[in-house]
């Protein structure tokens, strides 16, 4: 199946359809060309099979939760994100915490059956998101597993089956604009299955690469402030960092430098695809600190006001409807030159 959007790696940067992202662009003396500015949007295909918690996500205007409406509204918002210069979004087949932050996670949000089979209703929604991203020229960072839901898989064999089936599904449909994030924050000590924990997750990274015959680009992420382990660095095509809990931009910059010193590192992209620190109006913030070290950066907005106005907690308003969202997308437009482009596409200096 012919696809419009193809992502590849060129040293420490990315190309889309053979051209460096944000081609020719720099900002305040820092190279933007080749970066992949992104936002965490993991609830695009969210649902909840738990009979008690499903009511938590009811839309205020209808009094019920509707996963199809959630995806429809997500699709409707995507063109506006792209017009501001955003080139990537992070999704996850097991979502993320729909409360933003909480200890217990009783809800049941998983695209996998207990045996690792794929749930067709999730794939239907995912197909629509991936297809639209392909049309818009956007990259999807697609996570397979999440520590709040990995227990929904029966055992390690089911995890392997799930990874294989998800990879094969992507290959069968010819998606070439997807970066695989095997699991979200592999070093968080809440994963039930050892293969998803930091000591062994490189085995799963390598397995996905082998199943795809290295046609898909694969990595995994670490928790806020953590540096990737040598085992993951050696197995991965790109490296994912998180800035949650890191309030000092200098630490963000240091994380990138330290990552490049891990044994096994060779020229490869470094991306933050989750950071809940903002300060976009300040001359120094986490986003600019990452870019200053030539690392991509990703927006994580859990929201305020009972977590209903960010991008993490259903029912999500996917529009650019709050001061924080406006500040992020305005900054992306300025960094990428989208504000000067007639159609919102990145423009040259």
Image (cartoon, grey):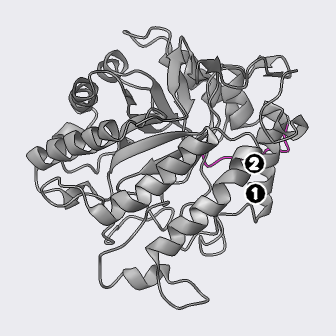
* Figure quadrant of residue 185: top left
Q: Residue furthest front?
A: 1
Find residue 113 and report its horizontal and vertical position in percent: 19, 61
- Discs 1, 2 touching: Cβ within 8 Å: yes
Q: Which residues are magenta?
A: 275-282
The quadrant of the picture occupied by the N terminus is: top left
Residue density around tag 2, few if under 14, some if 14–19, many if 20 or more, within 10 Å: many
Where disc 1 sits, the SS reads helix
Look at mark 2 in the image and give the residue it sits on. Answer: 328
The dominant secondary structure in magenta is: loop
Q: Is residue 347 left or right of residue 53?
A: right
Query: What residue is drawn where x is 83% and y is 16%?
Result: 29
Find residue 121 and report its horizontal and vertical position in percent: 33, 66
Residue density around tag 1, few if under 14, some if 14–19, many if 20 or more, within 10 Å: some
> Can residue 283 be seen from the camera position used here?
yes
Q: Is residue 331 above or below residue 300?
A: above
Query: What residue is drawn where x is 47% and y is 72%?
Result: 68
Task: Give the number of the disc on residue 324.
Answer: 1
Comparing 174 with 7, the one in front is 174
Q: Is residue 283 left or right of residue 31?
A: right
Q: Is residue 233 above or below residue 216?
A: above
Comparing 22 with 294, the one in front is 22
């Amino acid at each position: 199946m012919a696809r419009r959007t193809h992502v590849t790696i060129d040293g420490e940067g990315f190309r889309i359809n053979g051209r460096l992202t944000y081609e020719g662009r720099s900002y305040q003396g820092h190279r933007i060309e080749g970066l992949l500015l992104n936002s965490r949007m993991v609830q695009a295909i969210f649902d909840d099979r738990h009979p008690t918690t499903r009511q938590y996500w009811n839309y205020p205007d209808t009094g019920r939760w509707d996963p199809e409406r959630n995806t429809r509204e997500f699709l409707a918002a995507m063109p506006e994100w792209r017009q501001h210069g955003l080139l990537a979004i992070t999704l996850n087949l097991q979502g993320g915490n729909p409360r933003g932050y909480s200890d217990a996670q009783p809800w049941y949000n998983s695209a996998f059956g207990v045996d690792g089979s794929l749930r067709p209703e999730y794939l239907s929604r995912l197909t629509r998101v991936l297809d639209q991203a392909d049309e818009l020229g956007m990259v999807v960072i697609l996570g397979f597993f999440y520590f709040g839901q990995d227990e929904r898989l029966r055992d390690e064999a089911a995890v392997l089956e799930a990874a294989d089936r998800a990879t094969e599904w992507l290959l069968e449909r010819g998606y070439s604009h997807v970066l695989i994030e095997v699991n979200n924050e592999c070093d968080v000590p809440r994963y039930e299955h050892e293969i998803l924990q930091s000591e062994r997750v490189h085995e799963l990274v390598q397995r996905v690469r082998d199943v795809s015959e290295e046609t898909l680009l694969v990595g995994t992420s670490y928790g806020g402030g953590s540096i990737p382990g040598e085992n993951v660095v050696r197995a991965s095509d790109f490296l994912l960092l998180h800035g949650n809990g890191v309030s000092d931009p200098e630490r963000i910059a240091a994380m990138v430098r330290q990552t490049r010193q891990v044994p096994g590192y060779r020229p490869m992209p470094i991306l933050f695809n989750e950071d809940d620190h903002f300060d976009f109006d300040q001359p120094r913030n986490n986003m600019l600190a990452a870019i200053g070290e030539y690392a991509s950066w990703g927006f994580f907005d859990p929201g305020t006001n009972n977590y209903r106005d960010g991008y993490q907690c259903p029912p999500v308003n996917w529009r650019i409807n709050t001061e924080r969202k406006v500040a992020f997308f305005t900054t992306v437009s300025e960094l990428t030159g989208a504000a000067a482009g007639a159609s919102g596409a990145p423009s040259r200096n």
